[in-house]
Image (cartoon, helix red, strand yellow):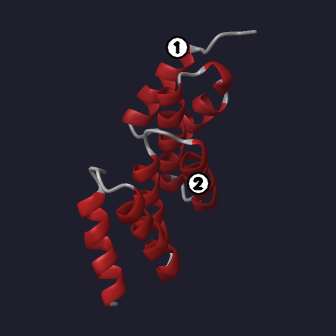
């Protein structure tokens, strides 16, 4: 059983940081997540979702963000806000509102609470 490939992970992180999103997706996709520490796994999913968003593959971004909200631990609120913003961008106001409300209702200590409230107010006002 191969252990988590730290060097492949780091090369994915570096590609992501220099905004080479396709390369980051390629590298992260090759990782064996079974041996990844939980927080690292969530970060990879989040960065891959962001990279997919940048490459225009919004459905893939949603799949990964949704996965974080289901199995995640440390980045659920983060993923929900990102999903809300994506829904809003795609004109799906009801889904955006639901995501922002979820952050407010279930993650009151989130660092994203004010952003969620602000976005909710802007979305409901329209």
Q: Pointer 2: residues within 10 angstroms few (<14), some, or many (20+)?
A: some
Residue 64 at least partly seen: yes
- Asked which quadrant contains residue 122, the reply is bottom left
How many numbered badges does the structure rendering display? 2
**Closer-to-camera residue (34/14):** 34
Residue tagged by mark 1? 7
Taking 55 as reference, is 86 above or below it?
A: below
Who is closer to the viewer here, 32 or 125?
Answer: 125
Q: Is residue 21 visible?
A: no
Image coordinates of residue 77 in percent, x first then y, are 41, 52
* Nearer-the-camera pick, 12 or 120: 120
Q: Residue at x 41, y 58 (%)?
A: 106
Q: Identify the residue under disc 2.
A: 66
| Residue 32, image x, y percentages | 67, 23
Q: In the displayed structure, does residue 119 sit left or right of residue 16? A: left
Residue appearing at x 29%, y 55% in the figure: 112
Q: Residue furthest bottom?
A: 126
Residue sitting at x 29%, y 51%:
109
Quadrant holding the C terminus: bottom left
């Amino acid at each position: 059983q191969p252990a988590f490939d730290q060097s492949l992970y780091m090369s994915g992180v570096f590609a992501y940081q220099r905004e080479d999103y396709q390369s980051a997706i390629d590298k992260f996709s090759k990782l064996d997540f079974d041996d990844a520490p939980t927080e690292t796994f969530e970060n990879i999913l989040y960065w891959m979702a962001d990279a997919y968003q940048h490459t225009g593959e919004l459905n893939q971004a949603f799949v990964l963000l949704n996965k974080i909200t289901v199995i995640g631990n440390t980045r659920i609120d983060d993923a929900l806000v990102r999903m809300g913003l994506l829904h809003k961008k795609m004109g799906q106001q009801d889904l955006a509102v639901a995501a922002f409300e979820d952050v407010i209702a279930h993650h009151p200590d989130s660092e994203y609470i004010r952003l969620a409230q602000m976005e909710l107010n802007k979305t409901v006002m329209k």
